[in-house]
Each structure stands twice: as structure tokens, then as C-alpha cells.
Amino acid sequence: MSSDVNELTVNYEEDGVVTTKEKDKVILSRGTWATIIFRYQDWDRQKQTYGPDKFSIRRYQKKSGEYRQQSKFNISSSDQAKKIIEALQNWIKG
């Protein structure tokens, strides 16, 4: 992990191949508890290309100077992301 919230990533490499590639991130909250939403793609070994965009909201807690992931929620498709956005927009309107 990292001691700096800006350095947290979902990038993951296996056997010299980046199997999870971070495309973007937004830090939603900072401090002892940090929340970050990531945009990423997974490597498709059969097609030898990256798949569609996926999203993950992750919570990190800083202990002993290092951030450690405590929980995550993966949004598996753009369609699911749109439904979450729609629900939040409807709730916030009121």
C-alpha cells in the first residue's frame, strides 16, 4: 500500500502483463478514512485486449502511516453505473 492517498491505485500486474489497468480516479474523501472511485479495465487473455470500462469505489483506512483497503464495491458495467447515477440524482433533487 501507500502512505499517500494520491498514490493508491488499482493497477495490477501478473507475469509482466497489466491485468487491471487504471484509467482514472477521483478521490472523494481524504484523511484517516479515504474513499476513491476508480475507472479501470481488465485484460482479456482470450482476446488479448482490454475489456470495457469498469468502476470501483474503495475505502481505505490509514493505520501505522499506511493506507489499507477496508472495503470495495465494484460497478461491473456502464449500464449499472448509469442506474446508480440516476438513483442518486433522483434522491438529491428533493
Image: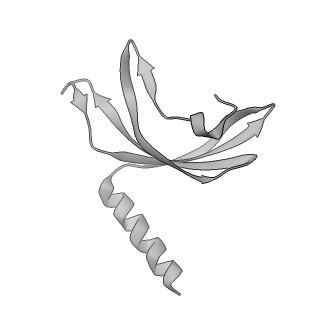
Total tally of numbered discs in the picture: 0
Q: Which residue of the protein is positioned furthest toward the right in this rendering?
A: 64
Residue 65 picture location, percent across and down: 78, 32
Image quarter of residue 67: top right
Say if 37 sits above or below 86 in the image.
above
Q: Residue at x 42, y 65 (%)?
A: 84
Protein image colouring: one colour
Q: Residue at x 25, y 23 (%)?
A: 45
Q: Which residue of the protein is positioned furthest toward the bottom in this rendering?
A: 94
Image quarter of residue 16: top left
Instruction: Give left or right: position of 47 versus 42.
Output: left
Instruction: Give left or right: position of 60 versus 91.
Output: right
Residue 71 picture location, percent across and down: 61, 44
Say if 15 sits above or below 47 in the image.
above
Q: Residue at x 56, y 48 (%)?
A: 36
Instruction: Give left or right: position of 92 versus 22.
Output: right
Q: Observer-nearest residue: 86 or 8?
A: 8
Residue 2 picture location, percent across and down: 65, 30
Residue 77 picture location, percent across and down: 33, 52
Q: Which residue of the protein is positioned furthest toward the top in this rendering?
A: 15
**Picture quarter with the N terminus:** top right
Say if 90 sits above or below 56 in the image.
below
Q: Residue at x 45, y 76 (%)?
A: 89
Q: Observer-nearest residue: 43 or 38?
A: 38
